[in-house]
Amino acid sequence: MMRGRRQMSLMMKRIFRYASFLSNVAMIAIAVFLGMIAFRDVLAPPRIPATITPSLPPEAAAARLNPVGQRVPLQNIDWAKNKKTLVMYVSSKCRYCTESGPFYQRLVDEKGPSNVKFVAVMPQTVEEGREYLSNLGVKIGDIYQTPLQSIGVKSTPTLLLVNESGVVTDSWVGKLQPEREQEVVSKLTL
């Protein structure tokens, strides 16, 4: 009887060790799984946001990624009235737009040739846009509200130089370095 209890006790110890081992393995597997979930954004390659619907043909997709050579789909602008129009796509929530404010102010104040028109396009309401630009000291009368992708722009700030046919001839993205600012000024005065 003692011997039976001893064997039973040894068997219970083995079962307990085996169960303990299995629970440890399960805990490690769960920890690895949760760690992978927690760090998937760090470990995974960067994701490019889908701004183009898969149903677009390749040439249309390329046009939306690079607006140069494309017509700007803004309503109520008579492009033919001016030889050039500088469309400034900015946002009041964009720090680079705010940091670029002095450059935009110089552009608008210097006016360049009289055949250059300045237009601001923002995702905010026209009233918010007017207040934002006024706070920056940028005096633009034509302010429009439209979503970012609707005019072929990926980010703010973006400057689009548009000809009298409404076609983008040049574009600049981001806060510009002084040499790029000079490039914009040169393109306006040509």
Image: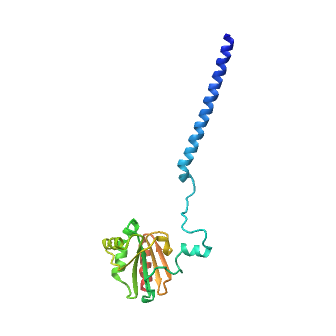
Q: Quadrant of the N terminus?
A: top right
- Seen at 36% across and 72% down, the residue is 129
- Seen at 42% across and 85% down, the residue is 189
Q: Position of residue 77 (x, y in %)?
A: 43, 83
- Towards the viewer: 86 or 14: 14
Q: Quadrant of residue 139?
A: bottom left
Q: Position of residue 9 (x, y in %)?
A: 64, 18
- Towards the viewer: 110 or 29: 29
Q: Position of residue 46 (x, y in %)?
A: 55, 58
- Towards the viewer: 168 or 127: 127
Q: Position of residue 30 (x, y in %)?
A: 58, 40
Where 85 falls versus 30 (above or below)? below
- Seen at 35% across and 77% down, the residue is 106
| Count of numbered tags | 0
Where 40 falls versus 133 (above or below)? above
Where 157 falls versus 38 (above or below)? below
Q: Quadrant of residue 35?
A: top right
Q: Quadrant of the C terminus?
A: bottom left
Q: Tell which residue pokes out farthest to the top in this image.
A: 1
* 189 displayed left or right of 71: left
Where 142 falls versus 47 (above or below)? below
* 155 displayed left or right of 5: left
Q: Quadrant of residue 143?
A: bottom left
Colour treatment of the image? rainbow
* 89 displayed left or right of 8: left
* 67 displayed left or right of 142: right
